[in-house]
Amino acid sequence: MDILLLGPPGAGKGTQGALLAERLGLPKFATGDLLRDAVKRGTPVGLRAKAVMEAGQLVSDEIIMGVVRDELAKPEARNGVIFDGVVRTIAQADGVTALLTELGRKMDHVLFFDVPDQEILARIEKRRGIEGRADDDPAAVATRLQAYRAQTAPVLDWYRSRGQVHLIQAVGDVKAIAATVQGIIGR
Ligand code: ADP
C-alpha cells in the first residue's frame, strides 16, 4: 500500500507517518530526512542541496526524483511506502505517479494534514529550540512557507482532481489524530 502525506511544514506528517509506518509494517520515506543525511555525509546530492535547504527553498525536482527512484528500487519498498513530504511540486506529482505506474502501483491514499499558520509558526519555533535545524530560523521559515504556498499547495488540487484526498484536522492530541488516520486507512 502506498500512502502520501501532504501538508505544510510542521503539520506533524513525520510524527503521524512514523506511527502509521509502524502499524502497517511499511517503510517511511521522508525526502527532508534523506537530504539532511546526505548533507551531513557530504555526498554529491548533499553538496548540491545544502545551501538551498538552509535558505528554506525547494531542492530541484531532478534531485528529488533521483532520490525517489533510488528509494523505490530498494527491496523493502516493494510492498508500499509511506511518502512523507515527498511530493512538493506538480512536476514531482507527475514523476512519482509515473514511477509507481511503472511498478504497477498507485497512491492508495492521500492524506492532507491541515494546520493553521499560527500553530505552524509556534510548532517550528518550539522545534528550533530542540533540534537546532538551520532552516528553522525565522527568515528560512518564512521562505519555506512561501515555497509551500506557491509550489506545494497546488499539489493538493492536483491529487483532488484525480481522486479522493482525506483532510485531517491536525491540531490537538497526537493519539486522537492517529486514530483519525487509522479510521481512514481502515487499519
Ligand atoms: P519541512 O517540511 O518542515 O519544511 P523537511 O524536513 O520535510 O521540512 O524538508 C526540509 C527541506 O528539504 C525543505 O525545506 C526543502 O529544502 C528540502 N526538501 C524536502 N523534500 C523536498 C521535496 N520533495 N522537494 C523539494 N525540496 C524538498
Image: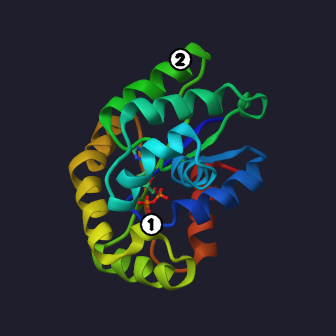
What's the mark number on residue 48?
A: none
Does residue 26 lie above or below 20 as drawn?
above
Comes first in the chain, label 2 or label 1 = 1
- Identify the residue at image location x=53%, y=17%: 101
Disc 2 to disc 1, how far (Cα)?
A: 28 Å
Colouring method of the image: rainbow
What's the mark number on residue 11?
A: 1
Q: Amino acid at mark 2?
A: Thr
Q: Which residue is mark 2?
A: 101
Does residue 82 lie above or below 115 as drawn?
above
Q: Amino acid at mark 1?
A: Ala
Q: Quadrant of residue 130?
A: bottom right
Q: Is residue 30 visible?
A: yes
SS at mark 2 in the image: helix
Q: Quadrant of residue 105?
A: top right
Label total for image: 2
Judge from the rendering whether residue 62 lies leftward or rightward of residue 12; answer left or right. left
- Identify the residue at image location x=62%, y=17%: 103
Judge from the rendering whether residue 153 lies leftward or rightward of residue 42; answer left or right. left
Coordinates of residue 48 in the picture (x, y in percent): 44, 42
- Identify the residue at image location x=57%, y=52%: 184
SS at mark 1 in the image: loop
Within 8 Å: ligand 1 and the Cβ of disc 1? Answer: yes
